[in-house]
Image: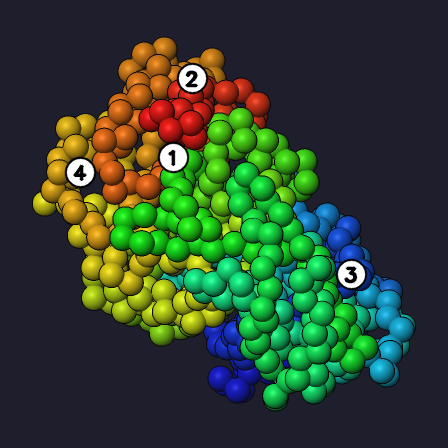
Amino acid sequence: MLERSDLAENALAALHDEAYDRAFDRRDLTAQGMIFTGGRKARSLDGDWNFCVDLLDTGLRQKWFAMQPGDPADRIEPWDYDPHMGDTVPVPSNWQMLQDRWYFFEGGSWYTRPLDIEPDPDGRLFLRIGAASYDCKVFLNGEYLGNHLGASTPFFVELTDHVREGRNWLMLFVDNRRRPDRLPMQNTDWFNYGGIYREVSLYRTPRTVIRDLFVTLAPGRYDLVRAEIEVEGATEAHLRIDGLVDRTIPLTGGRAMVEIPAEPHLWSTDDPHLYDVELTAGPDRVTDRVGFRQIERRGTEILLNGSPIWLRGIAVHEDDEKLGKVTNHVDLTRRFDHAKALNCNFMRLAHYPHHEDASRMADERGILIWAEIPVYWAIDFANPATQADARNQLAELVRRDRNRASVVIWSVGNENPDTDARLDFMSDLAALARSMDPTRLIAAACLINHNTLKIEDRLAEHLDIIGINEYYGWYDEDFDDLEKIGRNSDPDRPVVISETGADADITPQGPKTGLFSEAYQAEIYRKQIATLSKLDYVKGMSPWILYDFRTERRQGIFQRGWNRKGLIAADKTTRKQAFGILADFYARRAEGKA
């Protein structure tokens, strides 16, 4: 605590050294450290953790992580916090939802828990953190093991050589500050929840570890199953797909990419058929449930298994009145039930990677998914560190979800201005997604050129689908401009209306007519549907949004900290008039009558 600083003879590091955090900015917990977890037995570390908010980063300055447990009466220094006792919070959770005084807190917080371990000399031990917003630094028994950037993707820390027999102490420093170089940056339009808000688990493996397994149909083929395998510590692996494949595969440098003749029953929205998949390598074994399908675009058409499809969608956020950004099975089930009630075959998971169980449920329910990373608005496109963060978040998302048949679109951003730096940044992300996964379509939610009333984003040539966010009748007053855009644009690839809509406050304080009324929102939906139905290059839509959600920037008398564009109110029960209007349109679309 009283560590001397080399700034001056009378300086204390904890008080005077503003470079206190540089040694911790390693950014070394990345997609390269991921392991495949399907079918593995996990030890949950969820539950109560000791907790302290730390606005001034005192814990890093004073090195709380090095503090040993013991009786406070025996201390020889007056520490400002004891991580081994005191207040607790549940994990997963967002601290904003736990105490009123933490509601707008943005900064660092400490999570600590004991970890009792029996070392296994023949095995390895990995910590998996499902999501921690935004910068998570990991310490075990006072040793710094690395940090991860990104609020919504999972990361792993190997503990094998760092645990000791018996009691260990795991500490996580989680910092959710908004900064210019983060994704998103300071200016955003959803609530900046903080904390460890997805599950934390321990995985034991043999010394041989299956790092990755990617199983799909070979692009453009219905008679070839492609498998990409990565294993540490083996020269061969055995792949079994129930009723299709049973083969030993040699590995070179721990890797293999093979194409195996097979004709699987195809996964589709009407028939979401899944196969049991098993991979063994030495003593290690993983499993998954995988569907096989083809998604492609030809000209302005989107084709699923060779047949044109119109994406009847809805956009969704991870947000809940009581849980914040935490997702559970009940909430997910309700979300998909409402999508089905809307007659959807498609959901846009905005604006960041959602919980992995969302795409698993979509696999089972036959819902197509647009998955994206938070390259949102005015990202620091010229900053190489920001680009590295974006690339890693994309890689973690792709590695996590590329076995999900439901995921048909990787989106590399939302509503970014068409600058040279942005074009370089996002075209690079599109190329990375294609290199990691050539079996899916690439999209971004683009902006219309309001001067020319035309779709002409330069990024479009790097995309398969042009997403367009337009709010004619709401932010753009002249609804006739939407038809002009249709006449002026002649895109050579499909367009999906990735956002459209209007706010409706149906609380007792809400208006009955005019802006923010339920009737106004309903009329906007009627006009949007009538106009978009005339544009043959529009191949789908995902209106904004399924539920009302929290956002700090919305403070009008009819908003009060909420975006009210939901088709369902924040209680996730009360449907607005526009819900029925969209559901009816989608029903007619599904029947070929609209």
Q: How far is the residue under mark 2 from the one under mark 1?
A: 14 Å
* Nearer the camera: disc 1 or disc 4: 4
Residue 270 in percent (x, y) is at 55, 38
Give the structural element (helix, strand or loop) at label 4.
helix
Q: Earlier in the sequence, mark 1 or mark 3?
A: 3
Q: Earlier in the sequence, mark 3 or mark 4?
A: 3
Mark 3 and mark 4 in contact? Answer it, CB < 8 Å.
no
Q: Quadrant of residue 152?
A: bottom right
Residue 112 drawn above or below residue 208: above
- The residue to which callout 1 is attached is 543
* Kind of residue at disc 1: Pro
Residue 362 drawn above or below residue 562: below
Q: Nearer the viewer, residue 186 or 496?
A: 496
* Kind of residue at disc 2: Gln
In this rendering, position of residue 403 left or right of residue 379: right
| Image quadrant containing the C terminus | top left
In this rendering, position of residue 268 left or right of residue 186: right
Residue at image x 13%, y 38%?
Answer: 487
Mark 1 and mark 3 in contact? Answer it, CB < 8 Å.
no
Q: How far is the residue under mark 3 from the one under mark 4?
A: 52 Å
Q: Earlier in the sequence, mark 3 or mark 2?
A: 3
Q: Quadrant of residue 520?
A: top left
- The residue to which callout 3 is attached is 42
Which mark identifies residue 486? 4
Residue 15 in percent (x, y) is at 55, 71
Most distant residue in the top direction: 512
